[in-house]
Amino acid sequence: MYIFFCQCNVIFTLLDTLQNKS
């Protein structure tokens, strides 16, 4: 469960970074 949450956190962080660059 914790690992899944961690992966989701990384994905959302990457998405946020991509949106910031745009």
Image (spheres, rainbow, N blue to C red):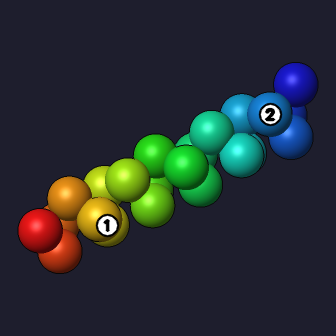
Q: In which quarter of the image is the N terminus?
A: top right
**Position of residue 20 measured from the top left corner of the image (x, y, whole percent):** 17, 66
| Location of residue 6 with respect to 19 vertically, above or below | above
Amino acid tagged 2: Phe
| Residue at the spot 37% in from the left edge and 53% down from the top edge | 15
**Position of residue 22 measured from the top left corner of the image (x, y, whole percent):** 11, 68
How many marks are shown on the rendered structure? 2
| Location of residue 10 with respect to 4 vertically, above or below | below
**Quadrant location of residue 4?**
top right
Q: Are marks 2 and 1 in contact (CB under 8 Å)?
A: no
Q: Which residue lies furthest to the top in this view?
A: 1
Amino acid tagged 1: Thr
**Position of residue 2 measured from the top left corner of the image (x, y, whole percent):** 84, 34
Please tell me which residue lies in front, 9 or 19. Answer: 19
| Residue at the spot 45% in from the left edge and 56% down from the top edge | 13
Q: Which residue lies furthest to the left in this view?
A: 22
Badge number at residue 2: none
| Callout 1 secondary element | helix
* Crowd around label 2: few <14 · some 14–19 · many ≥20 (10 Å): few
Badge number at residue 17: 1
Q: How far, Cα to Cα, is label 2 from label 1?
A: 20 Å
| Residue at the spot 72% in from the left edge and 34% down from the top edge | 5
Counting residues from the start of the chain, the first of labels 2 and 1 encountered is 2
* Crowd around label 1: few <14 · some 14–19 · many ≥20 (10 Å): few
| Residue at the spot 31% in from the left edge and 55% down from the top edge | 16
| Callout 2 secondary element | helix
Residue carrying label 2: 4
Please tell me which residue lies in front, 1 or 17. Answer: 17
**Position of residue 3 measured from the top left corner of the image (x, y, whole percent):** 86, 40
